Structure formats: C-alpha cells, structure tokens
Image (cartoon, rainbow, N blue to C red):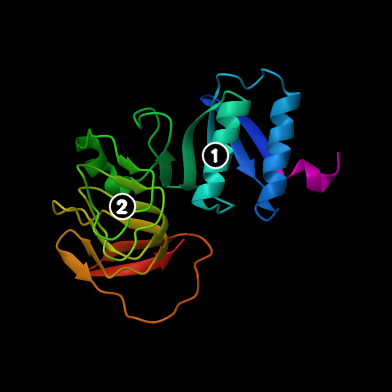
C-alpha cells in the first residue's frame, strides 16, 4: 500500500474505543471510499465499538460528517460517540456527554453546575424559528437570517451563522459562539451585544469563535 493511500484515513485505538482521522487534504470521496473498503475487509473487528471522528486537522461539511456517520453505523455497526472539532470543542453525537469532557479551565465552573445535556438541532434553522437551550446548543446546519438561537451555555453552529445568537443567556460571559462562518444580524454573550459590519468577507478555513475579551465581543479564527 502506497504512502498516499495509507494516509487517507487513520484509525487509532484508545481506552474508550477508536479514533478516526481523515486525511487533511484528500478528496472526501476518496476518504469515504477508503473507509468503506476498510470496514468491509475488517469483518466484525469494529462491530459494536465506539469511535470518535477527529476533525482537528480536516474541516468537513455537515453532509460529509453525516455520510461518515451513516457508513460507520450501517456498514460497520460502529457508534460515533463524538466529533472533535478542536482541542476544546467536542460535539457529542450518539451518547450523552457525561463520559468525556474536553479540558477547558476558564469554563470549568460553569460546566460543573450545568447538568443538562446540550440541545442538538439536526437541521438548518430557518427564518422565524427560535431555539432555546438550558445548557449548550448545537446546530447541525446553518442558522439563517430571521432565526434566533438562545442558550444558557455555548452555541455551536456546524455551518454558517447568519441569524441572531445569544450565548450565556443567564449572564455567563465565558460562554462562546462557534461556527464555520459568523455573519449574524446580531450576537449576544451574557449582557454584551455586537452587530457585525456589513460587507463581504473571506470564508474561514476552519472555525470562527465569538467570545468576550474585556468588555467587548471579539471574533477570532481557530
């Protein structure tokens, strides 16, 4: 097997199951084809196991993540428990989030007192929709103009944020808003409000994060 073929996907074992790492630049169709072949040739080796999809080096669209999830579930009988987007951002998929929490010292206090599982919306939020979450809120799609998302904790948009988002709704300034692209009509974190300037901007290659720095909401790129 050649070097380029070897690195299309890597599957590593850890104490909780397996970690799947797709190649950072290879075509997605080739990655999916290689994964299918790996599952077929491995027989029942991965059956009933738990797997984390590690996307820290490879950004995938929502539909691509869904395709990997479907292939692992239907062809390999593998449970995708987490999608790791960054060192301190893990999206829980097929399990409740109590087993593993990413290290996040600035937010440790808030996460200890929050016992509610995140609200996960598995579709695009369209104009007129209002989503409320007693903890974190995860959107597996876009937040369109005219839609509103309000969360006591973080807001994580697995797509583009172009509507209204209010994180840390009970006053937690350590809350963050994550998205592939943040171009909202308005964002709020705790008691702070920001309205981004109008105009074109380049598409982010990774993830964008809105967080409080001082007394202002700042936008950073991961």
Secondary structure beneath label 1:
strand
> Is residue 60 magenta-colored?
no
The image quarter in which residue 10 lies: top right
How many neighbours does mark 1 have within 10 angstroms: few (below 14), some (14-19), or many (20 or more)?
Answer: many
Indicate left or right for 161 with 114 as reference: right
Camera-side residue of 67 and 133: 67
Residue ID at (40%, 32%): 100
Residue ID at (78%, 41%): 6
Secondary structure beneath label 2:
strand
**Residue marked by disc 2:** 155
Residue 55 visible, this orientation: no
Residue 138 visible, this orientation: yes
Q: What number is the disc on residue 215?
A: none
Indicate left or right for 196 with 192 as reference: right
Coordinates of residue 2 in the picture (x, y in percent): 86, 43
The image quarter in which residue 95 lies: top left
Coordinates of residue 5 in the picture (x, y in percent): 79, 44
Q: Is residue 88 above or below residue 117?
A: below
Q: Which residues are magenta?
A: 1-8
Coordinates of residue 103 in the picture (x, y in percent): 39, 42
Q: What number is the disc on residue 53?
A: 1
Indicate left or right for 218 with 207 as reference: left
The image quarter in which residue 7 lies: top right
Residue ID at (33%, 54%): 125
Residue ID at (59%, 52%): 58
Marks 1 and 2, the one that precedes in the sequence:
1
Classify the position of the N terminus by image quarter: top right
Cα distance in 3D space between marks 1 and 2: 20 Å
């Amino acid at each position: 097997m050649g070097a380029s073929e070897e690195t299309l996907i890597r599957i590593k074992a850890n104490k909780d199951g397996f970690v799947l790492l797709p190649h950072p630049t290879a075509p997605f169709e080739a990655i999916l084809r290689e994964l299918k072949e790996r599952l077929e040739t491995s027989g029942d080796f991965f059956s009933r196991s738990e797997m984390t999809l590690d996307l820290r080096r490879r950004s995938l669209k929502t539909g691509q993540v869904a395709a990997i999830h479907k292939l692992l579930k239907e062809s390999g009988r593998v449970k995708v428990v987490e999608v790791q987007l960054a060192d301190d951002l893990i999206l829980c998929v097929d399990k409740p989030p109590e087993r593993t929490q990413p290290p996040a010292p600035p937010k440790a206090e808030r996460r200890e007192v929050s016992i509610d599982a995140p609200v996960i919306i598995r579709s695009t939020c369209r104009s007129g929709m209002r989503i409320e979450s007693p903890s974190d809120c995860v959107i597996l799609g876009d937040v369109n103009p005219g839609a509103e998302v309000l969360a006591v904790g973080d807001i994580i948009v697995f797509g583009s944020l172009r509507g209204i988002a209010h994180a840390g709704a009970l006053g937690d300034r350590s809350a963050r808003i994550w998205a592939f692209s943040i171009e909202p009509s308005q964002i709020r974190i705790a008691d702070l409000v920001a309205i981004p300037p109008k105009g074109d901007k380049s598409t982010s290659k990774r993830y964008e994060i809105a967080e409080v720095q001082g007394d202002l909401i700042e936008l950073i790129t991961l």
